[in-house]
Image (cartoon, rainbow, N blue to C red):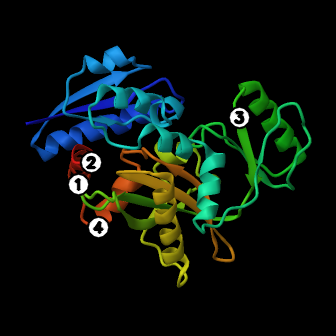
Amino acid sequence: MIRVLVLGGGPDAEREVSLHSSSEVASALRAHGGFSVDYRVIDRATLADLRALRSDVVFPVLHGRWGEGGGLQDLLELTGVPFVGCAPAPARLAMDKAASRSFAQASGLGVKPAAILDPTDAVRPLALPVVVKPVFEGSSVGLFVCRSEEEWRAAHRATAASGKVALIEPYIKGVELTLGMIQQRPGDPSGAMRALPFIEIRPAQGLYDYEAKYTRDDTGYTVGPALAPGIGEGAAEGALACARAMGLRHLCRMDFILDDDGRAWFLEVNTMPGFTTHSLVPMAARAVGLEMPALCAHLVRCALED
């Protein structure tokens, strides 16, 4: 029987989300059958810690800079055990919002101009309204929408005090769309991904923030929304090209804003998207007949057969 080590937790701000996601993955793999599942919660594990956890394949369901952005992946590669998700270098590129924007633009996706927040300079480089968000965080952690000078000053102070590198980008009025992608077939040397259906997200109140993503039950989701001709196809084609260029593997999710003129603008990419009961990749996979146990088993087989 294949021994799968599912990891959750980690030292990052998204630890709580990871605990929910990893627990769901472990339960799904047990429900699928054919796997011996060892579920462990870790903090900032060492190489010795990971080597002591015997397995045939690792499913690291951690979110955030260390768990998803290269630190854990460095250690997993050194163990020699196959693991679900990106290799270290692509993981770092995807976690870096500035770098991933460059790849998205080169792949033909719509990308708005942006700037890095300078904590020593309180002058705003872009016209209001703007969004300020950490370069190396997810789940809307540390995100500010600034529509006034007062909100900008508050965001600048908070971001400067955090010591985290942040991106300033134009606020785009519109509807959020997300596109999940998974590897088509285990053992395919090309690692080609396929796009799952788009999901349109409509928070009940304001921003699609941490609470709307994980704790509220009134966020609206439409799987496979009706989009203007060419919009969905173009964004999906660009997203797949971006994933190839960045070297992403097994799974990822890209987020967009569809503005009032019907153009999709790239926001960010996630290489280990959520697997909670509110999460979007499992929701999209379910719409094409891939329930959570089958989805998780597919990803494990992709890692094993690389």
* Image coords of residue 90 (percent x, y): 49, 45
Is 2 above or below relative to 262? above
- In the image: residue 241, left or right of residue 110: left
Q: Nearer the viewer, residue 8 or 77?
A: 77
Q: Amino acid at mark 4?
A: Val
Residue beneath disc 2 = 306
Disc 3 versus disc 1: nearer the observer: 1
Tags 4 and 2 touching, CB below 8 Å = no
Which of marks 1 and 3 precedes in the sequence?
3
Residue beneath disc 1 = 187
What number is the disc on residue 288? 4
* Image coords of residue 201 (percent x, y): 52, 61
Tags 1 and 2 touching, CB below 8 Å = yes
Which of marks 2 and 4 precedes in the sequence?
4
Which of marks 2 and 1 precedes in the sequence?
1
Q: Nearer the viewer, residue 185 or 258?
A: 185
Q: Amino acid at mark 2?
A: Asp
What residue lies at 55% left-to-right and 44% top-to-bottom?
Answer: 93
For label 2, the crowd category at 10 Å Cα-Cα, with few meaning under 14, some 14 to 19 and many 20 or more, is some
Spatial CA distance of label 4 from label 2 is 24 Å
Task: Answer whether residue 189 is visible to the viewer in this image.
Answer: yes
Which of marks 3 and 4 precedes in the sequence?
3
Determine whether the residue tagged by mark 1 lies in a helix, strand or loop: loop
